[in-house]
Structure formats: C-alpha cells, structure tokens
Amino acid sequence: KTLEKLPTFDLASHHHVRFHYAFALNRRNLPGDRQKALEIMIPLVEQEDQVASDMYCLVGRIYKDVFLESGFIDTESRDKGTFWFKKAFESEPTLQSGINYAVLLLAAGHCFDTSFELRKVGVKISSLLGKKGSLEK
C-alpha cells in the first residue's frame, strides 16, 4: 500500500511486486486477504500468453487454501485450484505444481486405478523425482 502512494510507482507494471504482495496476503490470511490476492493475480495470469509457472501455482495455492479452510466443502475453489495447478504443470512440470495438482485430483475423487489424468501426473512426478535423485553433488 505504501508503494501505491508513491507518485512514480505503477504497481500494474511490476509483476514481481504484485506476485509477492499477493503471496503475502494469502499467507497473512486476514478477512478479505485471499480475495484481494486473487484480484491481483487473476488479471496477471489471464492477460499473458505464457507466464511463469510460479504465478499459476500461486493462484492454485490460494484456491487450494480456500478449499482446505472450508473443511473440504468449497468444491468450486478445489476445481479452480486444480485448473491452475494443471496449467502450471503443463507449462513447466515441477514437483510443486505436480504434487499439488495430484492432491487436488485425489480430493476430487480421482483414483490411480481409474483416472488416466492422475496416472499421467503420477508418472511425470516419478520421472521428476528420479531426475532429482540422480543429480551428482
């Protein structure tokens, strides 16, 4: 808020500042903080052709936190979180995006035996873990 008061500062042109501000709001979690964080992030991830995977993950994380805080009742937030983690995982497969995507698929009732999508994510996560484990120090 202090930065917004500066006459030479344009918050809209500083994606990194907006990202960290939304991250801080989500973590602080006072009434209205998560909604404000989404209001900051949604235009960012929707206006760009391709954004950093971390930006998609933050939007997914906010929705996942809302879902968890609802006692697993707010399925709309679960599904929106799933959408954004999937988008992150498809743009740049990472353990963070993949594990969160898989967790939300499981929360939606997907099973490894019957869900092609969940198996596909599981295989990619396994591959990422394998690559991580084979790094030489």
Image (cartoon, rainbow, N blue to C red):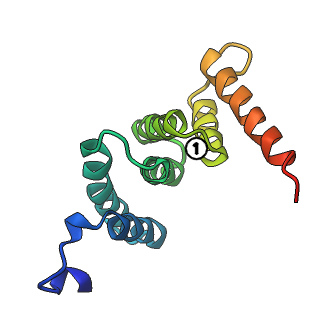
Considering only vertical position in the picture, is 19 above or below 90?
A: below
Q: Quadrant of the N terminus?
A: bottom left
Q: Residues within 10 Å of mark 1 (few under 14, many from 20)?
A: many
60 left or right of 89? left
**Viewer-proximal residue, 70 or 14?**
14
**Viewer-proximal residue, 99 or 53?**
53
Query: What's the amino acid at mark 1?
Result: Ser
> Pointer 1: what residue?
97
Considering only vertical position in the picture, is 26 above or below 122?
A: below
Give me the residue at 49% from left, 41% from top.
88
Q: Quadrant of the C terminus?
A: bottom right
SS class, disc 1: helix
Give me the residue at 22% from left, 70% from top.
11
Count of labels in the image: 1
Residue situated furthest left in the rendering: 7
121 left or right of 42? right
* x, y percent for residue 86: 50, 34
* x, y percent for residue 64: 50, 48
Corner quadrant of residue 104: top right
Corner quadrant of residue 26: bottom left
* x, y percent for residue 46: 28, 42
**Viewer-proximal residue, 38 or 98?**
98
